[in-house]
């Protein structure tokens, strides 16, 4: 199944045209705006046969849900978010050395978008998150993800603890990030079939999620701050896994 999604902002639109130009369905632009970068994008859209509709700022604000659009919004055809059945199917037929990212109640669209972007860059095979109390793929998420929202498989599950059990039954090690963990990520073998679990902004993982992990790891904090932003911490953990797996 496919879904229609709005993507706003020049950088985000450039990413879509770079990675998924055939998925662009429509475009809206502020034709009164004098911007050479915008003009180049409009030329590319025209060359692709995409008709751009003139729109006032308030119309573009509404299409982009109030986010900075820089005079351009496009509509893109993207895969629907996947469900638990799709996850079970993938786990029954693993490809290569499994590598998943699990997000437990991430609600900030900027954090989610950044996590998707980093997951794509790190070669993650899919992102798993909860159906409830987790942000969806909004225009803000798509903009921050810079193309990854169009390519990264996203699995929404009703019961995260149960999904983590499925991962473990498939031979995947579930490693959770927790600031109080005695073992650091740099002391942990991440070359195994792996699912990295990140907790919510400010609260971390929920109790059942934590108890479902095979092990907990921390990131050394050498300064005065106690923790990193969840998207930054996700990047640290994912790329430590990339380093260990020899992809860097």
Image (cartoon, helix red, strand yellow):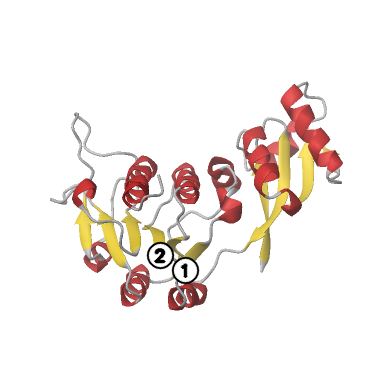
In the displayed structure, does residue 41 sit left or right of residue 183?
Answer: right
Residue 52 shows in this picture: no
- Can you say which quadrant of the picture contains the C terminus? top left
Q: Is residue 143 left or right of residue 90?
A: right
Q: Secondary structure at mark 1?
A: loop
Q: Which mark is residue 153?
A: none
Label 2 with label 1: CB-CB less than 8 Å: yes
In the image: residue 188, left or right of residue 91: left
- Which residue: 68% across, 30% down? 70
Percent x, y of residue 23? 73, 53
Mark 1 crowdedness (10 Å alpha carbons): few <14, some 14-19, many ≥20: few
Q: Could you say which is closer to the camera, residue 132 or residue 129?
A: 129
Q: Quadrant of residue 111?
A: top left
| Residue that badge 2 annotates | 98
Determine which quarter of the picture holds residue 196.
Answer: bottom left
> Where does the image place residue 61, in percent across and percent down from the top left?
68, 37
Q: At numbered mark 2, what does the secondary structure look like: helix, strand or loop? A: loop
Q: Which residue is mark 1?
A: 95
- Is 54 rendered above or below residue 124? above
């Amino acid at each position: 199944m496919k879904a229609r999604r709005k993507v706003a902002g020049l950088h985000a639109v450039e990413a879509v045209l770079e990675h998924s130009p055939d998925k662009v369905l429509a475009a809206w632009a502020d034709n009164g705006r004098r911007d050479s970068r915008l003009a180049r994008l409009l030329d590319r859209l025209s060359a692709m046969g995409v008709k751009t509709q003139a729109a006032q700022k308030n119309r573009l604000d509404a299409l982009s849900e109030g986010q900075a659009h820089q005079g351009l919004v496009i509509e893109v055809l993207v895969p629907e978010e996947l469900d638990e059945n799709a996850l079970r199917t993938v786990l029954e037929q693993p490809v290569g050395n499994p590598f998943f990212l699990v997000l437990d109640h991430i609600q900030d669209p900027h954090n989610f978008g950044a996590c998707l972007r980093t997951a794509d860059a790190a070669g993650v095979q899919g992102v798993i998150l909860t159906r409830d109390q987790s942000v969806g793929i909004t225009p803000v998420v798509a903009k921050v993800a810079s193309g990854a929202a169009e390519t990264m498989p996203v699995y929404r599950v009703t019961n995260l603890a149960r999904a983590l059990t499925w991962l473990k039954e498939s031979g995947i090690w579930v490693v959770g990030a927790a600031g109080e963990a005695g073992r650091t990520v740099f002391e942990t073998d991440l070359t195994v079939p792996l699912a990295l679990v990140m907790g919510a902004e400010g609260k971390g993982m929920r109790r059942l999620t934590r108890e479902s992990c095979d092990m907990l790891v921390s990131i050394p904090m050498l300064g005065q701050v106690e923790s990193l932003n969840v998207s930054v911490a996700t990047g640290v953990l994912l790329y430590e896994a990339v380093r260990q797996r020899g992809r860097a």
